[in-house]
Amino acid sequence: MDIAATLNEIAALSIKDRIFLVQAIWDSIAAEQAYPDLTEAQQHELDSRIDSYESDPDNVLTWQDIKASVKKHT
């Protein structure tokens, strides 16, 4: 397979079709449960966030809070 040629064909698609393609690719990866290994830094960050949540589970933001904050700062 010529990846460069495939990427050129993908670039010619509409944005809607490219988004659909990305979603389909991601779904196929998820279906195989083939996730890349985390780096040591990523694993450390994930562990830190889990520890933080477990020590204070009430210290969270809702999705609505996050959206409102983003909209306020844009």
Image: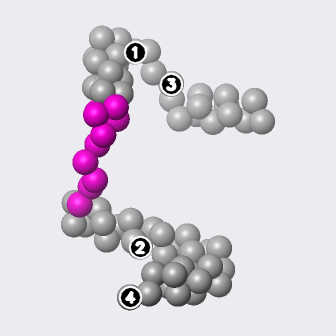
Alpha-carbon span between mark 1 and mark 4: 50 Å
Q: Which residues are magenta?
A: 34-43
Alpha-carbon span between mark 2 and mark 4: 19 Å
Q: Secondary structure at mark 4?
A: loop
Q: Which residue is mark 1?
A: 58
Quadrant for the N terminus in the image = bottom left
* Disc nearer the start of the sequence (1/2): 2
**Residue 52 vertical placement versus 14 (above, below):** above
Q: Amino acid at mark 4?
A: Met
The quadrant holding residue 46 is top left
* Disc nearer the start of the sequence (3/2): 2
Alpha-carbon span between mark 1 and mark 3: 9 Å
The colour scheme applied to this rendered structure is one colour
Alpha-carbon span between mark 3 and mark 2: 30 Å
Compare residues 23 and 66 and report the one nearer the observer. Answer: 23
Residues packed near mark 1 inside 10 Å, few (<14), some (14 to 19) or many (20 plus): few
Horizontal placement of 73 versus 13: left or right? right
Q: Which residue is mark 2?
A: 24
At 51% from the left and 29% from the top, the residue drawn is 62
Marks 3/2 in contact by CB < 8 Å: the verdict is no
Q: Which residue is mark 4?
A: 1
Can you tell which of label 1 and label 2 is closer to the viewer? 2
Q: Secondary structure at mark 1?
A: loop
Compare residues 45 and 18 and report the one nearer the observer. Answer: 45
Alpha-carbon span between mark 1 and mark 2: 36 Å
Quadrant for the C terminus in the image = top right
Alpha-carbon span between mark 3 and mark 4: 45 Å
Marks 2/4 in contact by CB < 8 Å: the verdict is no
